[in-house]
Amino acid sequence: MMAGTAGAYVPPRRAPRRAWKLRHAIEALFALTVVALLLGAFGVYLLSERILVIKEVRFEGNEYLSDQQILEAANVTDTDTFFSLDTRAIRARVLKMPYIKSCEVRRMGLSAVLISVTERAPVVSVMVNNHVYELDQDFRVLREVHPLAPPTGPLVTNLPGLNAVVPGQHVSHPVLSRAVELWRAFSAAPVAQQLTLSEISGRGANELIMVFNELPYETRWGRDDFPAQVRRFEALLREKQGKLPCEEYLDMRYDADIVCK
């Protein structure tokens, strides 16, 4: 008779593969939910602590406009955050300023923004109905200035047919163009260091009147090439040591036939 034997080995049952996948999916979903909740709580913390609120606006490139003027146009406020800040909208608003030629806006870290601009430079001042405006080289109206403030560039007055202008407007006027040509020719000559221009009265394209503080008479220009007229004017002043017998005007428009009245 055979001796009794131990019970037979029975291997443990494995969980079905589908159940195993389900358990791991639940665990992964739970982990992702916890992470999302933590990130959400951290985001709420950041916003509540105003860590991402824009606290500083920096400016670069502005010379004529103040930081405050650009800030007001940009409309960046203490409600803007790193995420809500719309740099394209800010750039568009700043570009509406007549003085701004180009603009770039970019974030600086988490709580600052840089507004970098290139400005238009005023080269001439124009008086229209007793209001004085600065214009750039393209004759774009930049801003109105006080009538008693020192003008930027020559002050051009009495432009025919020009009754009103507004900042941002482009002024296309043949007499204004001729007045600026005359000013450039005059300011490039040595005589410009001796005389102070008060204004250029633009009665017509060939009837420009320059008034100087140091001379008791007006000077009339037009018709021919301005640099040649300026050279004759300079030579005449030098020859007469600045003391011409003119009381009303000196007319430089007829080549060698200079009229002094």
Image: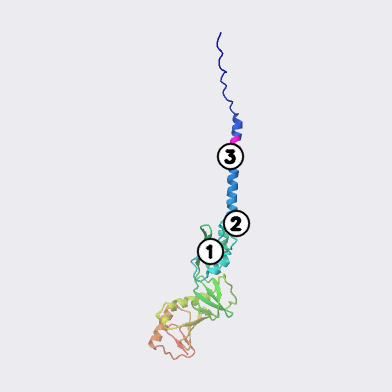
Q: Nearer the viewer, residue 117 or 39?
A: 39
Q: Position of residue 172 (x, y in %)?
A: 55, 72
Residue at the left extreme, as displayed:
239
Q: Name which residue type carries label 1.
A: Val
Q: Quadrant of the N terminus?
A: top right
Q: Name which residue type carries label 2.
A: Ser
Range covered by the magenta-colored residues:
23-30
Classed neighbour count for the residue bearing mark 2: other residues with Cα under 10 Å, few (<14), some (14–19), many (≥20): few
Residue 26 highlighted magenta (yes or no): yes
**Residue at 59% in and 46% down:** 36
Q: Name which residue type carries label 3.
A: Ala
**Residue at 55% in and 73% down:** 143
Classed neighbour count for the residue bearing mark 3: other residues with Cα under 10 Å, few (<14), some (14–19), many (≥20): few
Residue where numbered disc 2 is placed? 48
Q: Position of residue 160 (x, y in %)?
A: 57, 79
Residue where numbered disc 3 is placed? 28
Q: Which mark is residue 57?
A: 1
* Element carrying mark 3: helix
* Element carrying mark 2: helix
Q: Position of residue 114 (x, y in %)?
A: 51, 62
Residue 73 visible in the shown view: yes
